[in-house]
Structures are given as C-alpha cells and as structure tokens.
Image: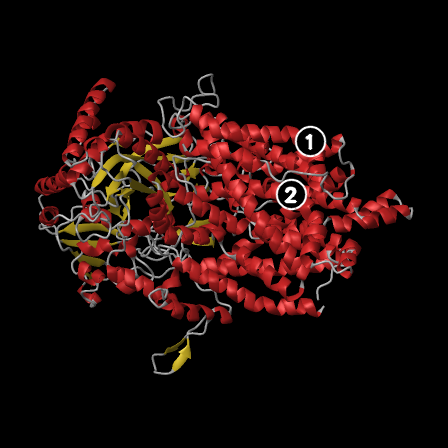
Amino acid sequence: MSYFLRRLLFMVPLILVIVTLAFFLVRVAPGGPFDKERKPASPAVERALAEKYHLNESLFSQYLRFLGLKWEEGANGSWQRAPGGLIAGDLGLSLKYRNHTVSDIILQGLPVSLTLGFLAFGFAMGFGIPIGFYTAVRRGEWADWAGSLFALVVICVPGFVIGPLLILGFALKAGWFPVGLWGAPVQAVLPMVALGLYFGGRVARLTREGMTQALQSEYIRTARAKGASELRVLLKHALPTAVMPVVSYSGPMLADLLTGSFVVENIFQIPGIGVFMVNSSLSRDYTMVVGLVLLYAILLLVLNLLVDLAYSFLDPRVRYE
Amino acid sequence: MKDAALSTESPTLAAAPAPVHLSPNRKAWLRLRSNRPAVWSAGFLALVLLLAIVVPWLSPHDAVHGSDAQFAAPSLQYWFGTDVHGRDVFTRVFSGARVSLLVGAVGAAVSLVIGVCWGMVAGYVGGRTDSVLMRVVDVLYALPSIVFVIVLITTMEGFVKQWVTALSPALAPAARMMFLFVGLGAVSWLTMARIVRGQVLSLRSRPFVLASQSLGASHRRILFRHILPNVIGIVIVYLTLTVPSIILYESFLSYLGLGIQPPAASLGTLIAEGASQINPLRVFWWLIIGPGGVLALTLLALNFLGDGLRDAFDPRSS
Amino acid sequence: MRIRVGKLLLLLLLGGLIAVGCRPERRADLVILNGPEIETLDPQVLTGQADGRVSGALFEGLTRFDPVTGRGVPGWAERWDISPDGRTYTFHLRTNAVFSTGEPITADDFVWSWRHAVDPATAADYSGFFFYVKGGRELVTGASTNLATLGIRALDPRTVVVELENPAPFFIDLCAMRIMAVVPRWTIEKYGDQWVRADPLPCSGAFQLRSWRPNDRIRVEKNPRYWDAASVRSERVDFLSGDSPTTALNLLLTGEVDVLIERNLIPLELNDVLLKRPDFHTFSYLGTYFIRFNVTRKPFDDVRVRKAISLVLDKRRIVERITRLGERPASAVTPPGTGGYQPPPGLGDNASSATNAVEYAAARAINIAEAQRLLAEAGFPGGKGFPTFTYMFNAGGGGGSRTHEQIGVEFQAMLREHLGLQMELRPVEWKTYLSEMSLLNYDVIRGSWIGDYQDPTTFLDCFLADSGNNRTGWRNPQYDALMARAAATSDSTKRFDLLRQAETLLTRDEVPVIPVYNYTGLYAFDTNRVGGISANLTDEHPVWAMFRKR
C-alpha cells in the first residue's frame, strides 16, 4: 500500500513537470493568441492587449505569475503576491474566449465529455470483452472469424467515416435519432456508438489475445486437471488474467475518452471539451492549453495508478517493490 | 536509377539468417505457411505494396496534375473516378498508399523497438527504474502532441529543409515527411510500453522465470529467451492496432496543415476528403470507397497476417 | 468485490444518462447556427463576424444597419444634421432611450462609450474606425492621452455632436458598427473587462442576454425597453456554435436550425447542388480573395515577375471549378459597386471581361504570351533559373481552408504549365500563417479582405505603407499621397477619381497582390419558414428583423 501512497504523492511534482513543459512548449510555437487576420488599430492597442494579459513580461515572470509566485510592488509601495495563479487554484482567463475563465469553460464542458466518455467506455467494454472472450474460446471456428472480422472492421474504419455514416443511416434515413446536438438522452446514442466502436474493436482484439494466452497457461491446465467446470475455469481463472492487456490499455483510453473526442464532438456538435483540446493548441490559447493539460495529466496519472492497482487485484503474483 | 539499385539489393536483404537446423524460427515459418488466411493476407499485402510502387509510375494519369474531368464517376478510363481537380483517384490512392504504408511502418517500428524494450525493462526490473520509465511515458503521453508537432516543424523545418535540399532538390518535400515521422513516432510507442510492462509484471513472477533466475541465467537471457516469447503475441496484436491509428493520426495532422504537403496525399487524407462530403444531398461515393476500401482491406490483411505470425511464434502452440 | 464494481459502473452509467436527460430545453423561436464559438460579446473589443452577430443583437449605437440595404439608418439617434462642410454631425437622441435594465441612455453615455473605445487601455482592435473622428487617430495611436480631445461632446442630454477629421460620406454607416455602440458605463466601471458577464447585463440593442454556454449556445430574449421593440418579432433567439459544415447542413435539413448564416459552414462540395435549392440564397458582398507577393524577397521584388505570375492565373477556372458559387473573377481589390465606386481595370482585365469561351481563350492566350515575355525580360526565359518558391496558405479548421488548398493546387499547375515555374504548396495552421505573413516570412501567400463599410477605402487603406494589414512589404509614396489627397477631398466624384488612380497603381502597375475573385455569400433558410433576411453588400443581417413564420 505504501507503494501506492508514494505514487500518489509523487504525482504532484510530476504534474508540475507536465504543466511546466506544456506552459513553455505552447509559448514557443509561432504566433500568439491575439494574432488576427487584421492588425489592431495601432501598436499602442497591441501593446495594451499584451499588457492586460501580461504577455509583455519575460517568460520566466509569466511562469511565476502562472504559478502564483509572482511578487510585485503594489501601488502603495508594499510588495505583494500577484493575485491568482496555480497555488490559488486559478487558471486564469482563456485568451481566446476572453469572457470566460479556463475553469469556467472546463466546468461547462467536462460533465458532457464525462457522460459521453463513460457511456462510450461502457459500450466499448460491453461489446469488446464478450466478443474477445467468445472469439478466443471458439478459436479457429466460424464464430471466431465473424467476431474478429467485426472487431477488425470497426478498428479500420475511422471515426470521421463512422460518424457521418451513422448519421446518414440512423438519423437522416431512418429518423430514429437526432442528427446532433446535446441535451436529451436520445442524442447521446449515436455519439456513444461512434466513439465506442473504435475502442470496442481494440478491446475485443486485446481480450482475445489475453484469453488465448491465458487458456494456454499452466495454471489453467492445472485448474482443468482438478476437474473444475469449464465455465468456471474460463470465468474464474482465465478471464482475470486475460483482461490484463485491456486493463493496461484502458488507462490511457479512459483518459482520452473522458476528455472528449475532437472528431465526434465536431460531427455531432456536442459541447464537450474535446474540441477545446485541439483548438486551444491551434489558437495558442496559452492558459487554456495549460489548463487542459493539467486536467488531462491528473486524469491520466490517476487512471494509470488505478490500472496498476487493478493488476495486483487481477493477478496476485504482481507485486511492486 | 536509385530505385533500381535498391531493388536489386533487396533480395539479399530479405534472405535473412540461413537456417541450418530446425530452429524455432524455422518451425514458426512452417507454421505460418500452413496458416491459410495469413498466407492470403501476406499475398494481398505484397500486392498492395507492388501496386503502391508501380501504379504511380505506370498509370497513364498523373497523381498531382489535374484534368478537365472533374468528379467523373468510375469508368474504364478512371477506375476509381476523379476528384475536384480531375485527378485520377486510382493513381492517387496508390501514391497515397506509399505514404501511408511508410508512415505505418515507421510508427510500427518505433513502437516495436522503443515501446517493447521500454516496457520490458520497466516491468522486469521494477522498483525505481519502473517508476522512472513509466513516468516518462506518462509525461510524454500527457503533453499536447499538436503543439509538439507545431513547435517541431516551425523551429526545425527551415534548417532541415536547407540541409535536405542541399543533398538533392527533389527531396525538398521529404523534409516535411521527416517531421511527420518524428512526431508520429514520438507518440506511437507509449501505449505499447504500458501494455508490455503490464504483461511483464505478471510474467516475471511466473515459475519458469523464477526457475531460470535461480539457475543463474543472465537478465538478458531471461528477458529475450523467456519473457519476450511470452509477450510477442500481445505485441503483434497491439502492433496491428497501432498501424491504423498512426495512419489516421497522420491524416489528422495533415488536415491541420502539419502533415504531408499537397498536392501529395496519403490514404488517410484521401479518406478524410471523401468523408467530409458524406451528406444527405449528394455523395461522390467513389471518393470514399476507393481509398477507404484499399485502407480497410490492407489493415484487415495486416491483422490476419499478424494473427498468423502470433500463432507461429507462440512458444506454447504445438 | 467484482459485483460491487459492476454495480458501481452500472450506477455511473445510469447517473450519466439521467444527467444527460435532466436538461430540458424549450426550443427558441428562432435558432441561428452562428459558426465558431464567439470570442467575446464586448462590442468594443470583438473582431469576429460570429461575435458581431450576437453582440449586434445586444448593443446598438446612434444608427443601426438596415436589414435590406445594409446601410446605417436611425438607431438611438432618431435624426441628425450634417454641417455643409461634412465635418460636423449633430445627432438627436430618442426621448425614450433606456438600457434593458431601465437606466437612461443619454448623450453623456455616448461620449463616455466612444472615449472608452478609443482608449488604448481598452485594447479595442477595431478602434481604427475612430480615425475618422477628430482626435481619434492621436488617441488610438497613443500620441495623445487626453480623452477629452476626441471630437464628440454632449450638447445637452439628448444631443450628441461629432466632429470629423475629414468629411467621410460613409460616417452614418460607420456609426452602426459594433464598436460605436453605447455601452453601460456603470457596469464597465464596476466589472472592468469582464463586464459582459454581469447579470443582468444592461443591453442597448433589440435583445438582452439570457444564457451563454461556451461552445454550445447563447440564448437572447427580446428587450422590451428597446425603442423599436414593436418590430422585433422573435421573443427568444438561440445562437448555436458549430464548426462542421456537414453537421450544419444536417441540422438545417432536419429543422433543428432555422438559419445558417456563416458561409464557412456551407459544405463546399455541394455548392453547385445547393445553389439550385430554394432554401439557399447567394448574395455578393464586400470581400475579395487575393494572393500576396512578398516584394521584399527576390525575385518577387521585380514587378515583371509579379505581373507574369499574375497574368497566368486563370481566375475563371478557379471560380467555375473550385468555388462554384458564381463568384466574380476580380482584377481589382475593391469589389465593383462599393459605395458607388467602380474600380479601374487591373492587370489581365481583358480576360475578366470576356463574355464567352472563345473570347476568354483568346484573352488568356494574349495574357500568357505577355507573361512569358515579361518573365524572359526579368531574366528567366521559360522559367529557367527561377528558384523554387512556396505558396503558403492556412489549413485546417472550417470549410474555407479546403478551398485554399484547392486554389493552390490549380495555381501550382498553371504556373508550371505556362511559365515553367516550380511552386511548392505549404499548408500551415492558422496562427503560423498569420505570424509568417506579418513577419514577411513567405514568398507568396493567400490573402483575403472583407470590407467593413461601403467605401473603397475599407480595401485600399490596407495597402498604405504604414498599414498593419499591408503585409506585402510593398510601400509606394505615390500611392500614399493619392490616398491622402482622396481623404481630404469632399467631392465624391473627385475623390473616387483619386482612389481609382491609386488602385490602378496597385493592381495594374505594381501588382503586390493578385486579386482572384470577389466573394459570393451563401446563407440558408427556408423562405416558407423564415423571413426578414435580405442580401446586402455589407453582409449585415440584423437579428431583430428575422422571424419564423407560423
């Protein structure tokens, strides 16, 4: 247990490293958040804009300000900490969407992305694991072929093809679902399928592989030799180790799913944060990029820790020294 | 000239270590040959590769120069129809396949070499090494890859381009490709490392590993003789999953203007182009079926071949 | 253990579904698909068209845009007097002028609003519109800091007097711009830059803000205190944000959206199909697509090279095969009919004016021959010795950028075929594109300009030597002198004459840019269901005039 506590503690400096890298990386990229097709009316206006958001300061000073460790001389001559900053839990204003704070935008979009992400995750696991399980058990038979083919097809067809096809078929032609937008449960179905299929296909492949290996291992043979029922062998002994690759994969997968998908949110016009994940980089929305990286990093690290925890549950032989 | 030279050399390259006795490799090869789907898939892949090499040369149409036949449906003249500039989609698909196959191969290679080694070492050594190695993976995974590629291209492109152009002006467009490879390679191996590490964590305390450890086998020997054969299955399977995601990620970067330079195309960008016009009013279906079909079939074949390879190399299969 | 995990997961899923379901939403009277998420609602600092559409519904100034003509008509000022020299405007405000929250709108509010807009500390990108007002230029550029020197004063609570630097015949149009709107002083003083987030937000336009969910929708409601509330026919209007053209089309076809007004949201591939549909409407407006040369780089510093490249560009092929909305090939930067101005024929105009294919082919042949001659004269016969150069354009994001690539591909082929030039295409993402263009770090780059008001200066001012929008490195004292003389001229015929001379210099003699075509706008709504939208040159479509038919 102390291993996991240490991991948890170590997360803080690690996240700081990630966020720091992102902070400088995005500022090195050419162009700035306020570059527009038209130049501002005068250099004075341009300067004033940069000053407002402290972009005229040195990178290091900006970094201190971002951390909340910037001390400056106040109007009355006394030194005080510049307000806000990471230590105050303040990520600042978005530089592109200037009437919103970064936390504002994330808090608005995150519940949507979380909902869709969990739904898609459930969907992916819900069909991926059974297909993988079944194809491994029926290895070489026609059921293996059919299941594997299905899994492969959904892996090979990209989301930006599946999405429009689902809309064309089930929304426009059949009229069962709306073509997009977000708000009613029925609007979540097609995006969930579009997002989940791709991951589900991969889950199926990984489960099949894990299961195949587990079925060949010595302890399964031992279990069978002991006369355990076939179903019990499969579910109780083989499945837990068989899903290990899936578990490894689901850390990053869930982090990706929960922070939204650019393609699916774009196609179904869903107000999640996936679109911001890409667009903030493109629009050099420095504060937004850093805020989203922070969110993503926390999610990823926590999920990967959970994955490592899950290893030792699934396979008691896994030990971390 | 250059290509001709390459092709005469390749047979010697392909004829890898000559087997003297019935080594495990030889056995695997025999097993692979008896796996019919794998053999068919290998044949298909070879065909696609061949077409990707010869079609852009032999085709009466040009992959980059347009004609007046805009959006022509498939016909005897244009097998896959034409696009907005009146370019032959068939020719473009196979010149695009060159790019995509290359991108996929690079991604797979990076994933295989870096990802597998990284994961095996982390999982096997464990402890602090494991922590450090995996945290590096986490950091790389969490960084916004788009910004990374933007920075990479803008800070290095001018320099590298000068250097490449000095070698041969015809290679200038290849400079962009190199960045694409670096950018894609940087992200392609991360999940592989995680998966391999997870497997190794579980394998290293299995009886056969403990046994060879107590017999005094070197770590290297244990890693490559005992652990590697046991993760090879999952490696191959995940590799076949990496290739499509790398190919599609390339098309995303290209869409953002960070990928290959038009008028060149890749299968991914061709599909994206076709997919963007799936709408209820009119669909030029050949723009999606042509490139999409070739990519899907190629990936399917790759997966079946991967399955065959996996079975062939499996130490426990009889 | 496993069962509990399973249950937990199930609960999470159910909870998620319920969370999704728990947001009942009454459909608004009018749903407008507004394009990308807006950056700000602040009328003084906004720059985007999508921002302007929403902000324009919330804030209004002395005049407002007429939905039919797109020109300035009485807003909060019910009438005005113009002095004989055209330099002093006296606006008479309405008696019932109040904000949506009930506070009165007085002449002082206008004075304060304008002073706030020109103050560089506000950082209003578009404060250049105040250059026409006396003292505006000095304040915006920071040469003067005394805001009281701005040529606007309150004669009495209901009378605003504005003094101009030069007579500007389009000043009434200008007064309808977002940045000229009256804004709530006390709110701004209280909340600072984030004042538009005040709740309730005092609005001066036909609508007031109801809710704003980023990347989702902005809902506005009719402002009952608006002076012309009787003409506002929608109680509740939603502005949706969206980025995908195909989705936009789907939403429109299924009736989820009533009006599709952002041209970047029209699927390009379907232009020819959509043109024939009754619910899609084209209109011309003040916009020109052009190509910039970096005249500070060899060999583009040679005007003969620029002319040669310009002459071989087959603009008709581009509008007929790529853009396909019936755009007009352009040989001048200013679109014909901008505020009554007719641009002079530019380089290669003989081809633009050809009426049939035979004439066109003949004109092209002449132009190509001329181009080859010019290129040879510049020292590159048949393109020999000409360095490989790049054509930069922005990629990604929205429908427009695919056009840029397609135009690039055609352009590349034309240059190779007729001049033997090797041009590489270089797509870059938006911010890199802007940055490289500003830094003059390109050879040839795509460009475009959308006019703000109905006067040629909205285009021609860009190419002044000190204009930040020039971005070609081209500076010509003669051009600047002609433009300055035109600015000081009040006689419209003489003024246009001077502007025409300047534009001739730009597009026929010096050619730092190649005009390609004038934009055609396309918007979509079913005329049986929606009314109150008209085509106009400034692409201004006031939301108060729009309504859904019952």
* Label 2 Cα crowd, 10 Å radius (few <14 / some 14-19 / many 20+): many
Residue type at the position of mark 1: Arg
Element type where label 2 sits in the image: helix
Residue situated in front as seen by the camera: A244 or C130:
A244
- Decide if residue A320 is in sight here: yes
Q: Position of residue C516 (x, y in %)?
A: 26, 35
Q: Residue at x 55, y 65 (%)?
A: A14
- Image height check: is B36 above or below A258? above
- Decide if residue A101 is in sight here: no
Residue type at the position of mark 2: Ile
The scheme the figure's colours follow is secondary structure
Q: Position of residue A257 (x, y in %)?
A: 59, 50
Chain under callout 1: B
Residue situated in front as seen by the camera: C452 or B307:
B307
Which of the labelled discs sits on residue B33, or is there none? 1
Q: Nearer the viewer, mark 2 or mark 1?
A: 1
Looking at the image, the residue that sits furthest to the right is A227
Label 2 to label 1: alpha-carbon separation: 17 Å
Q: Residue at x 48, y 64 (%)?
A: A20
* Label 1 Cα crowd, 10 Å radius (few <14 / some 14-19 / many 20+): some
In the image, taking residue C527 as reference, residue B184 lies left or right, namely right
Which of the labelled discs sits on residue B236, or is there none? 2
On the image, which quarter does residue A200 sit in?
top right
- Sequence-wise, the earlier of marks 2 and 1 is 1
Q: Are marks 2 and 1 on the same chain?
A: yes
Chain under callout 2: B
- Image height check: is C317 above or below C160? above
Q: Residue at x 72, y 46 (%)?
A: A210
Q: Position of residue C521 (x, y in %)?
A: 33, 36
Q: Position of residue C11 (x, y in %)?
A: 71, 53
Residue situated in front as seen by the camera: B73 or B160:
B160
